[in-house]
Amino acid sequence: MTLLSRDLSTQPHRPEKIIQFGEGNFLRAFVDWQIDLLNEQTDFNAGVTVVRPIDAGHPKLDTQGGVYTALIRGINEAGQPVSQPRIVTSVNREVLAYGEYDQVLRIAENPALAWVVSNTTEAGIAYDAQDTFNAHPPKTFPAKLTQFLFRRYQHFDGHPDKGLILLPCELIDHNGEKLKEMVLKYARLWELEGGFTDWILTANTFCSTLVDRIVTGYPRDEIETLETTLGYQDKFLVAAEYYNLFVIQGPQWLNDKLKLEQCPLNIKIVDNIKPYKERKVGILNGAHTAMVPVAYLSGLDTVGQAMQDEEVAGFLNGLLNDEVIPSLSMAEDELQAFKESVLDRFRNPYIKHYLISIALNSLTKFKTRLLPQLITYAQNQGTAPKYLSFSLAALYCFYLGQRNGEDIPLNDDEHLLAHFNQWRATTGSHAQSVGDFLRLQQHWDVDLTQLPNLEKLVSQYVDTIQSIGMKEALKTL
């Protein structure tokens, strides 16, 4: 069978306008896929040079001429399952930071370069005072970027038109602002000339972003069938869900720069990213966190099974409609539309998402994803919300560590698990232990027993779940 190559795709290399730090599945199925659509449907005409920022031994994208298949599968806007393979040709080549760093820095001298994209993991936007200006390369991504930008600044004599637009996609809050902060910190550490700092601040545009797409990567279990259907081999095939959203906090002229009038991708240029972040965390991430203990203790193992279960799906819908959405700041119609898209994504027949995998660090996830909505509801209504209280009770029962007589593989901070080791021995009512759970201020940052009716509700739900089981307890709601 023929190996996929640029000759097979018939698409030439495009002008090098984008440097991308990160060769992983997510960027290839998200940003590079979108750039490919822009190239096809507009005169964006941008080629991507991928920089592998870490020292890893897997083959380069160049072995296929930079091209690969993005297999987009899921539920479309009409509610129908779709499978859409696309040969992505936006990547021109891959350069290694470790071994080809001179080539990386030379890219800074390209006058056509306009964009920097990155996804170097959450730990990637970091500062290390041991990184030196003469390191080749330095350890951290911000240090590499500072060297790169300084090379560009010097090569073009600080010309204001040679600044770049930076779109970090690392999953941290205010990623653009933090990346700029790190670059300026390295400029001070290395005592680079003052004009460089001014050029960073005035000629470059650091944008904070929010990215949203589930990318499952190389479909190893299906690859033989898929390649037979496609008619070629592809060592870099990447699978992802149909849904995608790219929110960029930046100036409105980015709409023209990205040709979004000509190609209406789901890219939003906004002045304030915070409402979108709250929406994603509250509805998408919050729904996952609320669902896991309820569905798992109902005897289910995957998100798809949970969405097919009448009681669990009804619980999730009530929690989002009655308690999460009213606590968020965006317009209700936007929030409802996003909620429906999330539920469609949960029903995606092509993704097998195990609940126990999502359960990692669920106590912390509840605190960041659902506790703000619980507190807001209690303060506004004068009583605790029933669905969120039930979810908290289910979480407590989940951490007691048993499902149908079998141990649950709990994965969380040891000091939190130690409490449940004590509470697990409780016989009869769990009221005292639940009170202790809600008073864990070192975890919650507040004494949750002070919220009206919460302790009573959670205790009642815990005792119900423990006595009659999760499936029957759900019916009492």
Image (cartoon, rainbow, N blue to C red):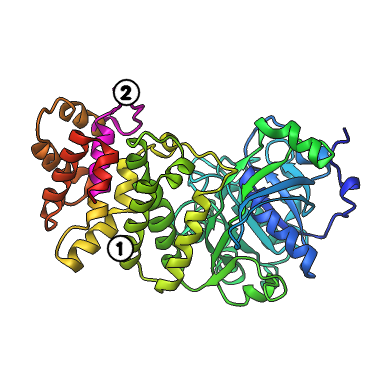
Task: Tell me, yes or no, whether the highlighted magenta stretch contains residue 110.
Answer: no
* Disc ID at residue 407: 2
Residue at the extreme top of the image, as rendered: 406
> Alpha carbon of mark 1 to alpha carbon of mark 2: how far?
33 Å
- Going 12% across and 36% down the picture, which residue do you hit? 430
- Looking at the rendered structure, the kind of residue marked 2 is Asp
Please tell me which of labels 1 and 2 falls first in the chain. 1
- Going 56% across and 52% down the picture, which residue do you hit? 213
**Residue contact at pointers 1 and 2, CB within 8 angstroms:** no
Q: Is residue 439 left or right of residue 392?
A: left
- Asked whether 131 or 95 is in front, the reply is 95
Q: Is residue 321 above or below residue 412?
A: below
The residue labelled by disc 1 is 322
Task: Tell me, yes or no, whether the highlighted magenta stretch contains residue 393.
Answer: yes
Residue 60 screen position, x and y as percent: 75, 37
Residue 286 screen position, x and y as percent: 37, 52
- Looking at the rendered structure, the kind of residue marked 1 is Asp
Q: Nearer the viewer, mark 1 or mark 2?
A: 1
Q: Magenta region: which residues?
A: 390-415
Q: Is residue 137 above or below residue 115?
A: above
Q: Is residue 248 left or right of residue 433?
A: right
- Going 29% across and 22% down the picture, which residue do you hit? 405
Q: Is residue 319 left or right of residue 80?
A: left
